[in-house]
Amino acid sequence: MDTSEKQIKRIVLDRMERCSVCHRGFEPDDVHVLSRKSDMWMLMVSCGECQARNFVAAVIGDGDAEEAQLALRRLGEEHVRARVDVEPEADVEAGEPVSIDDLLEIHEFLQSFDGDFQGLFRDR
């Protein structure tokens, strides 16, 4: 890894200290360079704990911020398309659709639920 890559990763980590999902602190190995041009770097920061991913465009010097935003948007769309195109696992059966009654039942349950999942599953 060259000096400029270390510097870019450090700048990204300084601005994105923790995962927004699980709050784990990011480490240099969590930052992956996807593409690199003279005025813009595309990076992915992935959490080693919960696997959440963030796409980052680092604009260098006089780079075009609007171009970076468009590149990020395209990258995000590609990521979503890739996830949609994934076939479900063969051993997973499709269940019945969630009904209005199911939603009402879970709503009523959650109104009195104290958040103790261990107790909830231990009692069963």
Image (cartoon, rainbow, N blue to C red):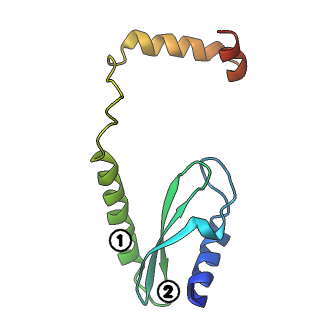
* 119 shown above or below 7: above
Residue furthest front as drawn = 91
Which residue type carries mark 2? Answer: Ile
Coordinates of residue 12 in the picture (x, y in percent)? 60, 72
Disc marking residue 71? 1
Does dot 2 land on a helix, a strand or a loop? loop
Report the disc number at residue 60. Answer: 2
Quarter of the image with the C terminus is top right
The image quadrant of residue 7 is bottom right
The residue closer to the viewer here, 63 or 81, is 81
- Disc 1 marks which amino acid? Ala
C-alpha gap between disc 1 and disc 2: 14 Å
Residue at the spot 32% in from the left edge and 65% down from the top edge: 74
Which class describes the residues within 10 Å of circle 2: few (<14), some (14-19), or many (20+)?
Answer: some
- Residue drawn where x is 50% and y is 60% of the image: 54
Query: In the rendering, which numbered label is found on residue 31?
Result: none
Q: On the rendered structure, is 119 left or right of 102?
A: right
Residue 80 lies, with reference to residue 87, above or below; the image says: below
Q: What element carries label 1?
A: helix
User: Looking at the image, is 50 positioned above or below residue 73?
Assistant: above
Taking the image as shown, residue 52 lies to the left or right of residue 92, namely: right
In this view, the residue in front, 70 or 32, is 32
35 or 112, which is in the foreground? 35
Where does the image place residue 73, in percent across and percent down from the top left?
36, 63
Mark earlier in primary sequence (1, 2): 2
Question: Label 1: few (<14), some or many (≥20) within 10 Å?
Answer: some
Residue 97 screen position, x and y as percent: 32, 19
The residue sitting at 34% across, 19% down in the picture is 95
